[in-house]
Image (cartoon, grey):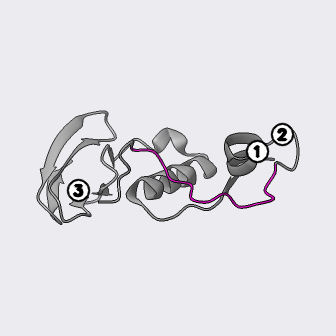
């Protein structure tokens, strides 16, 4: 599994010569003075800079959260999400069902948060997909 022991994102090697371009940039992470994660408001939109992000389940989850933030929908991120970055949830509102997928060859446990706030604990066998009524 590619989950770091500490569960933190791995930003990889710093990309040299990356600096905030103005004082309005919000710097969220830097390494050795090099920007790794920064955000900025641009009119009604948001920009996100992310550098050197190698693939891992934790990093994929970070990218997913960034997309919700950049689109101004961070308040919807928790709906139909799960706590384990090695798992993912797909919700099908027209059918009233959702599935939880284990993306590893190891058993996984996760908590799924539905849009109404209910939380369900799900246990998945290796590479399994479990269907649930919403």
Q: Give the CA distance from mark 2 to mark 3.
A: 39 Å
Element class at badge 2: loop
In the picture, the disc for residue 84 is: none
Q: Of tags 2 and 3, which is closer to the observer?
A: 2
Q: Which residue is mark 2?
A: 24
User: Which residue is drawn at the image coordinates 68% and 45% (left, top)?
Assistant: 30
Q: Say whether residue 126 is visible.
A: yes
Question: Where's residue 118, x and y in %?
Answer: 25, 34
Q: Give the CA distance from mark 1 to mark 2.
A: 8 Å
Neighbourhood count class around disc 3 (C-alpha, 10 Å): few under 14, some 14–19, many 20 upward: many
Q: Is residue 12 left or right of residue 31?
A: left
Q: Which residue is mark 3?
A: 100
Q: Is residue 57 left or right of residue 121?
A: right
Examine the residues drawn in magenta and state their main secondary structure: loop
Q: Which residue is mark 1?
A: 41
User: Which residue is drawn at the image coordinates 52% and 56% (left, top)?
Assistant: 63
Q: Say whether residue 92 is visible.
A: no
Q: Nearer the viewer, residue 115 or 58?
A: 58
Contact (CB < 8 A) between labels 1 and 2? Answer: yes
Neighbourhood count class around disc 1 (C-alpha, 10 Å): few under 14, some 14–19, many 20 upward: few
Q: Which residues are magenta?
A: 7-19
Contact (CB < 8 A) between labels 2 and 3? Answer: no
Q: Classify 12 as above or below 121.
A: below
User: Which residue is drawn at the image coordinates 82% and 48% (left, top)?
Assistant: 20
Q: Is residue 86 left or right of residue 27?
A: left
Q: Residue furthest right?
A: 22
Element class at badge 1: strand
Question: Where's residue 81, x and y in %?
Answer: 35, 47
Q: Nearer the viewer, residue 62 or 13?
A: 13
Q: Give the CA distance from mark 3 to mark 1.
A: 34 Å
Element class at badge 3: strand
């Amino acid at each position: 599994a590619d989950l770091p022991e500490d569960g933190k994102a791995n930003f990889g090697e710093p990309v040299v010569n990356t600096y905030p371009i103005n004082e309005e940039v919000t710097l969220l992470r830097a390494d050795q003075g090099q920007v790794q994660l920064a955000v900025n408001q641009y009119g009604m939109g948001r920009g996100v800079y992310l550098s050197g992000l190698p693939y891992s389940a934790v990093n994929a989850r970070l990218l997913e959260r960034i997309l919700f933030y950049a689109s101004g929908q961070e308040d919807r991120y928790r709906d139909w999400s799960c706590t384990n970055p090695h798992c993912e949830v797909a919700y099908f509102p027209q059918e009233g069902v959702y599935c939880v997928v284990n993306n590893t060859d190891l058993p996984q446990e996760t908590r799924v948060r539905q849009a109404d706030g209910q939380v369900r604990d799900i246990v998945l066998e290796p590479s399994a997909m479990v269907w649930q009524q919403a």
